[in-house]
Image: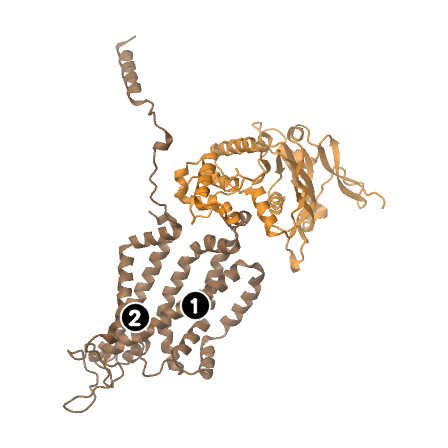
């Protein structure tokens, strides 16, 4: 045996002895990190809550909604519909740029824009949220039926073709003939046309998921249809529903202007963000009066961007690959 | 041994043109019976109706005609809720693709426990968790994994989850629809051995659907060969592989890859292509099922004939006078 061989052997033996030994442990002792004991929905919400930026936007939105609600009860608030006259001249305070009295200035007939903006935000937020929630409920229900029940597919497709090919303007004009203008009518008119798009989105997604094998497996295990819809479909649909809702809130605020133009919209004594933007847009060419457009647009932007980003963040959180 | 499942001249069709069922028959007049405790194989090329038969047994597809009886009860008809629940506990299925067969947005414990939650509400939550743990250990998964999502597992582990989901119902009969064809070669043996082990420990009966002939030879007791929706040969496995009668079976067996590249393959002798290539349209009449073909044209019928004990072959015979 050469010196080299002997050395190598010793080296190997020492290492074998020191590195390979029985651990004398049971498998049960090796506890695996097991933090995710929540249900899917709890984990989704927790993941969403970890997203700082989304939570910040939620806070902004909540504060905005809270402020629009309590604003009329704060001290020294002005009536949104009152026309203010100057004490000196007795004339209306028209197109007053923001001052200490009128924080957002006044409009072309001398109404206070601060209170009009918040009053408008109240109306528009209520309309936007109510319409998109009603749309989501009706659209999801119809979409689930449309996508899940094979026999109803042709029926709902024909209904979709029928409703989608009637221009919504005509439907709105017809409704404006029948009903009296007001918040309820506006709600009805906006809901009447929007849900079918939602239903189509849901249906298309359902067709992708419906024939996957895990649904067949669930059926074979004796799971009821309602539970299959809740457990197998909803986790995939929730991101689409939320995205549609978050996108339909700003679009409702926009289309309300159009409906007002048709004569179906809100009466003059109820300001809305749509009305304010419409009025402000007319002043766009006059650099001194652009503040009239600035403030309502700012509020609409905050609402739109927040809802959109929150919807996106929730869609991300709904994917279990991000549950960490 | 008693018969567990019996198929009596089953025809299954998908909706054809004009929504008349039975125009496009995927399976025609299939009859076989599965004994308790045996592994019955369904073999055939893709599109021959193997999966269709499996799903019809699991009552996912309606049959056009014929009876499927399970323990003497006809199951291809409307059943009461009680019978349906009972069948859920008696028959289960293992799926081909472990990626598609598990809901990726549901946790492993929810997937495995779904069956007992759906059919037996009297079981308490603690007992359910215990049963989930026990079943997971039985298929070789650690119970700590149960709060994970299926995306965090490998293909073999996902197939084990699929098996556990079926096993927790304590079934007696399992339809295994190509359970290994989507798996890695190294994992196939594990899954097959697991299935075999479970068959021994629980006394399961399998309907094993596959097109992988070496696996069928290793795994099954009896095999039915399907060809364009018809069963052309039923025989015990060893008998079928050593002594095939039907030309299609011979062709199928000759297509097993062998390490002799020069060997002449019978594959090229496929008869059915000639006729439909001429007309451009494939009719069921053009497919040559029989051993004897040309002489009896117009007067023949198809029958299963017992050539050897337990070895049935589909043959064209002369129509008996009515």
Q: Which residue is mark 2?
A: A300
The N terminus of chain A lies in which quarter of the figure? Answer: top left
Q: Secondary structure at mark 2?
A: helix
Mark 1 or mark 2, which is nearer the start of the sequence? 1
Q: Which residue is mark 1?
A: A135
Return the residue nearer the eye: B82 or A154: B82
Callout 1: chain: A
Q: Residues within 10 Å of mark 2 (few under 14, many from 20)?
A: many
> Which chain is the one coloured brown?
A
Q: Position of residue B196 (x, y in %)?
A: 54, 31
Horizontal side, residue A96 vs residue A274: left or right: left
Q: Residue furthest right?
A: B321
Residue at point 23%, 85% (across, down): A110
Q: Is residue B180 above or below residue A210?
A: above
Residue at point 72%, 47% (across, down): B285
Residue at point 44%, 70% (across, down): A194
> Which chain is the one coloured orange?
B
Residue at point 42%, 83% (across, down): A180
Q: Is residue A104 above or below residue A231?
A: below
Callout 2: chain: A
Return the residue nearer the eye: A191 or B269: A191
Q: CA distance from mark 2 to mark 1?
A: 20 Å
Return the residue nearer the eye: A191 or B299: A191
User: Residue A254 lies in what quarter of the image?
Assistant: bottom left
């Amino acid at each position: 045996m050469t010196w080299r061989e002997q050395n190598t052997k010793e080296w190997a033996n020492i290492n074998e002895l020191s590195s390979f030994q029985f651990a004398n442990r049971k498998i049960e002792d090796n506890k695996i990190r097991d933090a995710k004991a929540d249900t899917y929905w709890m984990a989704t919400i927790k993941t969403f809550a970890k997203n700082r930026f989304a939570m910040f936007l939620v806070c902004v939105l909540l504060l905005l909604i809270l402020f629009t609600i309590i604003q009329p009860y704060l001290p020294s608030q002005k009536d949104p519909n009152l026309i203010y006259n100057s004490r000196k001249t007795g004339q209306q305070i028209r197109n007053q740029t923001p001052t200490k009295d009128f924080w957002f200035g006044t409009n072309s007939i001398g109404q206070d824009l601060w209170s009009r903006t918040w009053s408008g935000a109240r109306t528009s937020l209520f309309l936007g949220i109510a319409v998109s929630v009603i749309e989501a409920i009706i659209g999801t229900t119809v979409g689930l039926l449309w996508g899940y029940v094979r026999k109803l597919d042709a029926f709902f497709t024909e209904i979709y073709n029928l409703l989608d090919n009637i221009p919504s303007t005509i439907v709105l004009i017809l409704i404006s003939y029948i009903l009296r203008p007001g918040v309820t009518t506006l709600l009805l008119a906006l809901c009447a046309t929007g849900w079918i798009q939602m239903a189509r989105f849901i249906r298309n997604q359902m067709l992708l998921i419906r024939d996957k094998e895990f649904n067949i497996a669930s059926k074979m295990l004796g799971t009821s249809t309602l539970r299959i819809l809740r457990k197998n479909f909803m986790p995939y649909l929730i991101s689409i529903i939320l995205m549609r809702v978050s996108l339909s809130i700003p679009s409702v605020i926009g289309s309300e202007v159009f409906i007002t133009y048709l004569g179906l919209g809100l009466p003059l004594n109820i300001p809305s963000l749509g009305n304010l933007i419409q009025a402000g847009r007319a002043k766009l060419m006059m650099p001194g009066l652009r503040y009239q457009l600035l403030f309502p647009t700012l509020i609409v932007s905050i609402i739109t961007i927040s809802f959109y980003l929150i919807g996106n963040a929730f869609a991300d959180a709904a994917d279990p690959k991000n549950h960490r | 041994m008693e018969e567990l499942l019996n198929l009596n001249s089953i025809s299954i069709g998908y909706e054809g043109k004009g929504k008349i069922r039975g125009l496009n028959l995927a399976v025609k007049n299939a009859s076989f019976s599965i004994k308790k405790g045996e592994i019955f194989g369904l073999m055939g090329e893709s599109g021959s109706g193997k999966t269709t038969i499996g799903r019809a047994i699991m009552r996912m597809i309606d049959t056009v005609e014929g009876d499927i009886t399970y323990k003497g009860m006809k199951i291809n008809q409307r059943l009461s809720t009680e019978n349906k629940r009972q069948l859920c506990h008696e028959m289960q299925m293992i799926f081909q693709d472990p990626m598609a067969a598990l809901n990726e947005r549901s946790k492993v414990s929810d997937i495995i426990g779904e069956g007992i939650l759906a059919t037996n509400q009297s079981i308490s939550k603690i007992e359910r968790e215990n049963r989930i743990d026990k079943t997971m250990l039985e298929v070789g998964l650690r119970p700590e994994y149960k709060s994970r999502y299926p995306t965090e597992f490998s293909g073999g582990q996902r197939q084990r989850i699929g098996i556990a989901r079926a096993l927790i119902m304590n079934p007696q009969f399992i339809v295994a629809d190509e359970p290994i064809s989507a798996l890695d070669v190294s994992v196939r043996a594990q899954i097959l051995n697991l299935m075999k082990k479970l068959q021994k420990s629980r006394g399961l009966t399998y309907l094993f659907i596959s097109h992988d002939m070496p696996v069928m030879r290793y795994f099954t007791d009896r095999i039915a060969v399907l060809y364009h929706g018809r069963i052309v040969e039923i025989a015990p496995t060893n008998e079928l592989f050593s002594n095939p009668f039907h030309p299609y079976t011979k062709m199928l067996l000759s297509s097993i890859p062998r390490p002799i590249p020069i060997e002449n393959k019978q594959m090229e002798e496929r008869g059915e292509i000639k006729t439909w290539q001429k007309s451009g349209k494939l009719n069921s009449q053009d497919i040559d099922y029989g051993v004897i073909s040309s002489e009896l044209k117009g007067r023949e019928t198809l029958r299963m004939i017992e050539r050897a004990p337990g070895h049935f072959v589909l043959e064209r015979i002369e129509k008996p006078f009515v």
